[in-house]
Structures are given as structure tokens and as C-alpha cells.
Image (tube, grey):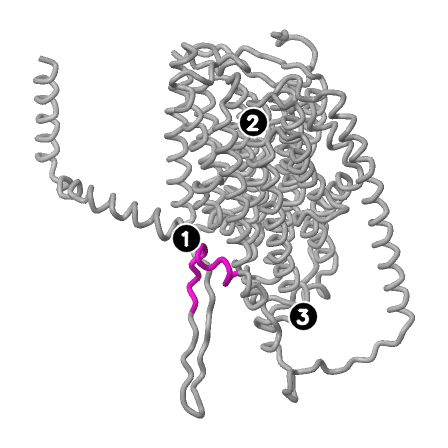
């Protein structure tokens, strides 16, 4: 339908307007001289706009219809449609939610008084990134899509290089810029192939393209490379760890919690264009997804940088979502409605869950770095006493991301386990049951990674300089964390609500996938899970209260800790994060290729020596960097053509014109 633009406020118009307002929220701060005022204005504008946008997106999600607007422009690429269907509306929810909470978090985390040179640009580009992602979800013209995609990519780049005076930040920005433009080049091919099949740059309607046409595999491959590089699917993930580690934490939260999903959205949307996709497509997605999940969490276990660990964990979660999408596509190819439902609801629910617990963890890491002044977990320790609120909220996020009940991460992963084991009884695709132990291995490694993170940061005694005095985070930093912790808990104890939220979007991917039989069966299962989750939460609460009561009633007597035979225990005797994960890292060292330096001790009185274990970017350092170095060497002769002399440049132009004239003749 084409609503009248002069009519009353419709939810679709409200959502688009809210996105534009968020994009403009940082503009006043660019012109105000007094530091901090622009940041406050941006937050005051962003919060109500995001609330209104969330309300409008929910209305559009449950309307089960698509709202279309025709944008007339003087471009030679045909008319531009803006369409919001339930799939777009679903992806709008984390855009508005994370952008609002991140804007509030930045007030305490990145105050203008301490960051006068960077706060204005950071605030402006943060709003532009959020706005561009929201607009991207409603665009249905390939050329306009590329334009908005580039705005999103460049605004993310400026967020990454906020602290550009540091060499590692500049390097992370360059790696991201190269990766994102390689992906964009692939998207140019993708939209050109779509235009060749449809005759226009308008994106095709669902189910209108033939998956068996010669151009279909090339189109899907170009989409997988272009969108997969943004999502962080392996082997297109090399930009992600350094970019998320070096960006400010609230920027990392929106990049991980939302921007990666834009790549997934592109893959989701592309797959809806084709009818009767071959089994090979679903198989490739499933294999790529489970490989990404396993390798992503493997790299996370080896990290000692708290934000790099969270970034590698994002790769793992993107892999889980891609695996679920591959399962859904296998269900479409084999006409197995239950598999389509389980795969799509599992994928969409994990997208929603990841947009809750990953911003919570990045906000928590920001509070920790703000208090500690370092990202190295081996230099931290004992923050649970100084930052009890952050410690509690960070524990909620850690439990959720490990897929442990009664929090939300367990629900989406349970759907996948249920779908895998269901194939043993249906005999349609029994081989999918083999994915269950791989997913269990991913979950086990996630427990190791986040046990290492939490214990290194919050338990024991500080391992670094004692001159730093950590402090509890302020209200503007704690409120967003509390909100996401409550959402993680809500989905964990009431998964039926989340299921109702994702079903309309799943229906867009495959009409008829949400049947009453399967939906009722999942409702019954989720009802049991809800009861188990509520009981386990009650048990944990009661045990905690009894423990605190006994602790307060008893008398605490301090005593020295056993020092392994030494008379005086020191901080050096504590297990650090690296030593905790050493065994797991050793098992997968063939993949991670750690740089291990061990001292060679000799003599009765050896000199002081040190040791280090440093995780490497295997693909980036072993493949990508040497490849670019080789290309640089091959094209090195071009440097000889740049003499800086005008007469040589005029000669080049004359030679080029002469060659063109001869060619035309």
C-alpha cells in the first residue's frame, strides 16, 4: 500500500522520523563552544526519539503488513521505495534501543570535560551511525542502499579512530576501512546482478527470483561476501577484533550489538528473493556458521584484552545465528516446515538476545576501563569489592552469553538443540544432529572464556599498579546496564514473550513457516522452561539471601592465604587470566598460533626474566597482510610514474588520449 504523506502520523513515518532525529542529535554540539552541552542535548534528543521509534517498530511488527512509501528523486536509477515490513521492524528494535542506552552511557563514560578534542565528533558520528542503520532497513533501491551503507561504514570508521593519536587505533581503522570497502565492492557486483535479473535497481519482492538461474549462485555469493564481511562471518572477520577493541566502549556496543546485524539482515533479505533454493546454499551457511562460532570462541579464550575477548565472542554469536539461518534454509529447500520455524526463530531470537547481553558486557567493560585505565585482564583483579554493582551486572551478562539458564542466551540456543535432536526422530535430515556436540563445544569454551574474564577482573587481588583506585560507575553508566540485565532476565523467565516478538519476522522469511501446530508445541516447551527458570531464579535468590544473612551474623576473622610453602604470599602467586586458559589454548594452538616467549634460566642465580603469551590474528597476519604486501610489491612500479613534474603528467594525458583515439578508430 502507498499511504498518503499528508495523513495522520503512521507508525512507519514515526519510525523514519525518529531515525532522522537521532541522526541530527549530534549537530548542535558541533557549533556550541561550551564543552559537554552538545553531548547532553544529543542524549536528551536521542532518548525520547528512540522510545517513540521502539513503539512504532512494535506496532509495525505486529501489524503483519508492509508499509510502502515512494520517494521521488532526480536520479537515473528508477524510483526509490521505502518499505517497512515485520522483518525490518524487528531489526529496528535493537537499533533504537542500543543507540539510546549508548548515548546515555557516554555521558558518564566519555565526558566532554576529559575528552574535549574527541567528544563532539564522537557524539555526532554515533548518531549518524544509528540513523543510517535504521534508514538502511527500510530502503528498497539498490543505489540508495549503497549510499546509506557507505554512510554507515564511514561513520563507524570515525568512531573507531576516535583516539587517532595512538598507532594501534590508526591501524585498526585502516584494517576496518579496507575490509568494509572490499565488502562494498562485492555489494556493487551484487546489486548489478540483481538488476540484470529484474531489469531495475528496485529490490525484488519475496520469492520472485529463480534460484536455478545461472546468475542466482553468483548473486548469493556476492551477497555472502559483501554482507558477511560486515557481519564478521569467517573468513571475513579479520577487521572485527581490533576495531571493537579500540573504539570507545559505547561505540563498540552499538557496532557489536547492532551494526554486525546489518550484515545478517542483508543475507536474510537476499534469501527471501529466491524460491526453491538448493540444499547446497543451506549447507554452506550452516558449515560457515558453526565454523565461525567454534573458531570465534576459540580465539576469545586466548585473549588477555577484555574488549578483544568480547569482540571475538561477537564472532562466535554471529556464527550461531548464521548456523540457525542455514538450518532454516535447509528446511525451506527440503520443505520441512518445522525446521524452517526452528531455524528462523532460533536465529532471530539469538539476534535479539545478543543485542541485550553484548551491549551490557561492552558497557561493563567500559566501566572497568574507565576505573582501571587498562584493558589488560592480567593487570586487573579484586574489582568485585570496589565495583560491586558493575560486578553483579557483568555477571548477569556473562551467564547470559554462556547460554546458562535462567537467562536469555539459554533460550535461543535451546531452540537449536531442540531442532538438532528433533531430526533424529523425523529422519528428514539426521545429519543435523551432528551439530549438537559442536554447539556444545562452543558453549563449553564460552564458559571457559567468561570464567577467565570475570575471575581475572573481579576476583582475587589487583595484579597491576596499586596507584590506581577503582571506583563504582555513575548512574548514567549503571542505568543502561541495569536495563539490559533486566531484559536478559525477562526473556529467560518469560520466553513466550520473545517468541511472539520473532514470529512475525520469521513469517516474512518463509510464509507459512509459523504454523499453529509448531507454535503451540514450542509454547508448551517454553512454558516448562519458564517454570524451570523462575524456580532456579528463586533458588538462587534464597540461597544468596541466606548466605548474606549468615555472613552478616557471623564473625569474620582475617587470616593469611596459603602461599604454596612461601612464608609471605604475594599477588604474583595468583592465577592470571592467561594461566587459567593455558590448557585450552594449548589444545587449539595450531589454529591460534600464539606467540609464546619463555625465559631460558641457567646457573644457580639466574637473572630476572619474563614470559609472555600473545594471541595473534591468524588470518590477518598470516594471509591478509602478506597478500597486501605482495600486491604492493607488484604495483610498486606505479610509484616510478609519479615524478611530481607537470610535463610528465601532460605527456601521460597525451599518450592516453592517443591510445583512446586509435582504439575508437
Q: Which residues are magenta?
A: 585-596
Return the x and y of residue 368 as percentages of the image width and height.
63, 58
Would you place residue 401 above or below residue 592 in this image?
above
Instruction: Report whether 300 appears left or right of 348.
Output: left
Instruction: Report whether 126 appears left or right of 382.
Output: left
Which of labels 3 and 2 is toward the front?
Answer: 2
Q: Residue at x 90, y 64 (%)?
A: 549
Q: CA distance from mark 3 to mark 1?
A: 32 Å
Q: Residue at x 52, y 23 (%)?
A: 271
In magenta segment, residue 324 = no
Mark 2 neighbour density, 10 Å: few (under 14) some (14–19) many (20 or more): many
Say how many tags the image has.
Answer: 3
Q: Circle 3 sits on which residue? A: 460
Return the x and y of residue 597 as percentages of the image width and height.
42, 70
Question: Which of disc 1 and disc 3 is earlier in sequence?
Answer: 3
Q: Report the disc number at residue 329.
A: 2
Q: Circle 1 sits on which residue? A: 618
Query: For numbered disc 1, what is the local secondary structure?
Result: helix
Viewer-proximal residue, 574 or 457? 574
Which of labels 1 and 2 is toward the front?
Answer: 2
Query: For numbered disc 2, what is the local secondary structure?
Result: helix
Would you place residue 440 above or below residue 20 in this image?
below
Mark 1 neighbour density, 10 Å: few (under 14) some (14–19) many (20 or more): some
Amino acid at each position: 500500500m502507498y499511504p498518503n504523506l499528508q495523513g495522520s502520523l503512521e507508525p512507519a513515518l514515526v519510525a523514519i522520523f525518529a531515525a532522522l532525529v537521532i541522526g541530527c542529535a549530534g549537530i548542535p554540539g558541533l557549533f556550541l563552544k561550551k564543552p559537554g552541552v552538545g553531548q547532553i542535548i544529543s542524549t536528551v534528543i536521542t532518548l525520547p526519539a528512540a522510545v517513540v521509534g521502539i513503539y512504532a517498530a512494535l506496532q509495525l511488527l505486529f501489524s503483519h503488513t508492509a508499509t510502502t512509501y515512494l520517494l521521488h528523486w532526480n536520479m537515473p536509477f528508477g524510483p526509490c521505495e521505502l518499505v517497512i515490513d515485520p522483518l525490518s521492524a524487528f531489526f529496528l528494535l535493537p537499533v533504537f534501543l542500543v543507540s539510546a542506552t549508548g548515548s546515555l552511557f557516554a555521558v558518564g563514560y566519555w565526558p566532554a570535560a576529559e575528552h574535549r578534542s574527541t567528544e563532539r565528533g564522537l557524539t555526532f558520528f554515533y548518531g549518524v551511525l544509528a540513523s543510517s542503520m535504521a534508514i538502511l532497513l527500510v530502503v528498497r533501491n539498490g543505489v540508495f542502499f549503497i549510499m546509506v551503507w557507505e554512510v554507515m561504514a564511514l561513520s563507524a570508521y570515525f568512531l573507531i579512530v576516535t583516539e587517532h593519536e595512538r598507532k594501534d587505533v590508526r591501524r585498526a581503522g585502516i584494517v576496518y576501512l579496507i575490509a568494509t570497502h572490499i565488502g562494498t565492492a562485492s555489494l556493487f557486483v551484487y546489486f548489478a546482478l540483481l538488476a540484470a535479473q529484474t531489469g531495475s535497481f528496485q529490490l525484488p519482492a519475496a520469492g520472485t527470483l529463480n534460484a536455478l538461474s545461472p546468475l542466482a549462485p553468483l548473486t548469493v555469493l556476492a551477497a555472502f561476501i559483501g554482507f558477511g564481511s560486515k557481519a564478521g562471518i569467517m573468513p571475513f572477520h579479520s577487521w572485527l577484533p581490533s576495531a571493537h577493541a579500540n573504539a570507545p566502549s559505547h561505540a563498540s556496543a552499538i557496532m557489536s550489538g547492532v551494526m554486525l546485524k546489518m550484515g545478517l539482515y542483508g543475507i536474510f533479505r537476499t534469501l527471501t528473493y529466491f524460491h526453491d533454493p538448493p540444499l547446497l546454499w543451506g549447507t554452506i551457511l550452516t558449515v560457515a556458521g558453526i565454523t565461525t562460532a567454534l573458531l570465534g570462541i576459540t580465539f576469545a579464550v586466548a585473549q588477555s584484552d577484555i574488549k578483544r575477548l568480547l569482540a571475538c565472542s561477537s564472532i562466535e554469536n554471529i556464527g550461531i545465528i548464521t548456523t540457525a539461518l542455514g538450518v532454516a534454509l535447509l528446511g525451506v529447500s527440503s520443505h520441512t516446515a518445522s525446521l524452517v520455524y526452528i531455524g528462523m526463530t532460533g536465529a532471530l531470537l539469538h539476534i535479539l538476545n545478543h543485542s541485550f547481553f553484548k551491549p551490557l558486557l561492552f558497557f561493563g567493560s567500559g566501566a572497568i576501563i574507565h576505573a582501571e585505565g587498562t584493558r589488560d585482564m592480567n593487570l586487573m583483579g579484586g574489582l568485585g569489592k570496589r565495583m560491586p554493582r558493575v560486578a553483579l551486572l557483568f555477571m548477569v551478562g556473562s551467564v547470559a552469553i554462556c547460554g546458562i539458564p535462567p537467562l536469555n542466551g539459554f533460550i535461543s540456543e535451546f531452540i537449536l538443540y531442540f531442532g538438532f535432536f528433533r531430526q533424529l526422530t523425523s529422519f528428514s535430515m539426521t545429519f543435523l544432529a551432528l551439530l549438537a556436540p559442536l554447539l556444545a563445544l562452543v558453549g563449553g569454551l564460552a564458559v571457559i572464556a567468561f570464567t577467565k574474564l570475570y575471575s581475572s577482573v573481579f576476583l582475587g587481588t589487583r595484579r597491576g599498579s596499586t596507584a590506581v583506585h577503582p571506583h563504582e560507575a555513575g548512574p548514567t553508566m549503571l542505568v543502561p546496564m541495569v536495563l539490559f540485565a533486566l531484559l536478559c532476565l525477562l526473556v529467560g523467565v518469560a520466553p513466550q514473550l520473545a517468541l511472539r516478538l520473532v514470529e512475525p519476522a520469521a513469517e516474512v522469511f518463509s510464509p507459512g513457516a509459523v504454523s499453529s501446530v509448531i507454535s503451540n508445541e514450542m509454547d508448551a516447551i517454553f512454558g516448562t522452561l519458564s517454570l524451570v527458570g523462575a524456580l532456579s531464579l528463586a533458588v538462587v535468590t534464597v540461597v544468596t539471601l541466606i548466605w548474606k544473612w549468615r555472613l552478616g551474623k557471623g564473625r569474620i576473622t582475617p587470616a593469611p592465604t596459603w602461599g604454596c610453602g612461601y612464608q609471605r604470599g604475594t599477588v604474583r602467586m595468583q592465577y592470571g587470566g592467561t594461566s587459567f586458559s593455558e590448557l585450552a589454548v594449548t589444545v587449539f594452538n595450531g589454529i591460534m598460533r600464539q606467540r609464546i616467549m619463555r625465559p631460558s634460566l641457567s646457573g644457580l642465580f639466574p637473572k630476572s626474566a619474563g614470559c609472555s603469551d600473545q594471541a595473534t590474528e591468524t588470518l590477518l597476519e598470516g594471509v591478509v597482510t602478506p597478500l597486501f604486501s605482495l600486491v604492493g610489491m607488484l604495483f610498486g612500479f606505479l610509484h616510478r610514474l609519479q615524478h611530481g613534474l607537470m610535463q610528465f603528467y601532460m605527456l601521460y594525458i597525451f599518450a592516453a588520449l592517443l591510445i583512446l583515439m586509435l582504439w575508437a578508430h
